[in-house]
Amino acid sequence: MINAMVTWLPSESDWNYHANVTGDDSWRFVSSFHLLPRYAKYVDKMRFRAENMHKIFAKIEKNNYLPRGTPNHGFDGFFQTQMGAMVQARQGTLTGNNVMKTYAQDFGNTQSMNNLLSRDPNEIGPTRDQTSSIYGQVSHTYANGGRYSSRDYIQNAVKAGNTNLTVSLTSLATKILFDTTGTKCSGANGQPRATGVEYLFGRSVYAADYRRTANNKGEKRTVLARREVIVSGGAFNSPQLLLLSGIGNKTELAKFNIPVIKDLPGVGQNLMDNQELPIVGSGSGGSGGTGLAMYKSKHPAHGERDVFLMGGQGFLFRGFWPSENVVRTPQETVRTPYGASIVKGSSVNNKGWVKLKSADPTETPEINFNHYAEGSEMDLEAIKDTIAWIRTVYKRVGITPVEPPCTKGPDANGYCGQEDVDWIHKQTFGHHPTSTCRIGADNDPGAVLDGKFRVRGVSGLRVVDASAFARIPGVFPSVSTFMISQKASDDMLAELKDGKALPVCSA
């Protein structure tokens, strides 16, 4: 997942959706219930029964930009957050350029530009998910601006020296092993139980690695689990590993002669993403800074703000164009470019997929995001709305719209009909894949996981990564992935404490 280090909490409805499909209130986001008198009698009971997702955020966050004790934030966790604009605002008043001023006017923002450009996007309140506004950028960075990621967390754990964690950079998981007889590891209700992982040890054995050669075969090895196997391969490799291990659509598995452990048709299906593309103009946005914006389009799929915007003078982000190990971009021809990049939230398209090309674990899977498939019309309409609106912003500022091109010129509201549709289909990209091993209800045939991340129909196996989301959360799912990782850890420790964990496998 590539997310420009943006740390942006999803909407309450994203978490509550998980609670609704699973019936598990530990997914519920209840932070604003105290503002509603009719819910008062339920709040304490719910918080006693289950952690809500914002408490988990406060638990993991190490906030570096707000005064200690600021509500709805954490200051003693591991997940570092910083807002450069707030640091700058303390040193002098921030001013916005003409594009930002026009955003603020259209949104009805009455705060000063200084306050808008340093506004906390992770503030929590009853109207947050309906509010169109300018914000400062919160990044997962240390106080000094240095990048923080899961790599830091792992390195710190290894350096601490008091953990049994082993990290291998030269291992490729190829198959999950199961006891299907109950001889050594009995599963719940006679289910097959995961007992370990088969892997290849060696450098660059996976086909996605540009350094791989025909000689990179790797050495087959096995590691056994005392209690559970936890898969965290991400939205592409987690479903690939499940499929290689016999968990997936039995018809697809039969094509590659993979023995079926559990017929789960949803594995690798439901691939979701935040659609992205730039809106490019030629001209000057004027002096002053730029911030981020989140606004509600005319076609919000979940009835709440649904489009994120970032950009500025010379900012043209068209995605990544990989060529071996070099990231390249096309030659730019726009003079004095100004860019506004869309990240579509509340995405509803779930028709993408990850499928096996063969039973060879070193081969990459087939990946198709299938953007704008039937049923995702709201995604397309919201992006059309945003392009049209930004065209009007550019016009008022004195910037000439260039992309998407509009041969005959847009209408009075900025729309350009089928030409926009064709451009959107060709130019959309994304870097936030989720939901290919999605959590779902007990009676949902497409659900892969239950609300505790357990793979349905087998024992001792969980998937904890972005593939688990029942639907894509927000506009930058990275922080949400950290949150569900903490939730999964808390769930497993609670099971162990309460005596509900699986028994240890016999030798």
Image (cartoon, rainbow, N blue to C red):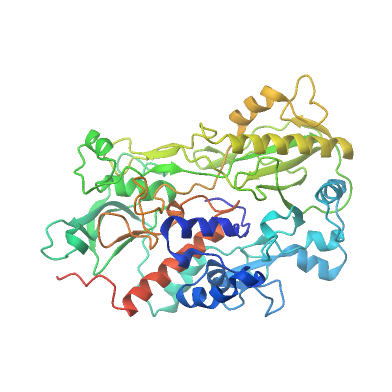
Q: Quadrant of residue 143?
A: bottom right
Front residue of 115 and 306: 306
Percent x, y for residue 424?
A: 63, 31
Q: Quadrant of residue 340?
A: top right
**Above or below: residue 125 compared with residue 97:** below
Q: Residue at x 88, y 38 (%)?
A: 396
**In this rendering, position of residue 115 left or right of residue 298:** right
Q: Residue at x 51, y 42 (%)?
A: 325
**In this rendering, position of residue 132 left or right of residue 230:** right
Percent x, y for residue 400?
A: 83, 32
Front residue of 110 and 478: 110
**In this rendering, position of residue 154 left or right of residue 137:** left
**Above or below: residue 163 compared with residue 400:** below
Percent x, y for residue 212?
A: 37, 43
**Above or below: residue 317 compared with residue 234:** above
**Above or below: residue 484 compared with residue 254:** below
Front residue of 315 and 217: 315
Q: Residue at x 43, y 51 (%)?
A: 467
Percent x, y for residue 27?
A: 48, 64
**In this rendering, position of residue 174 left or right of residue 191:** right
Count how many numbered circles sit on residues in the image: 0
Q: Residue at x 48, y 73 (%)?
A: 156
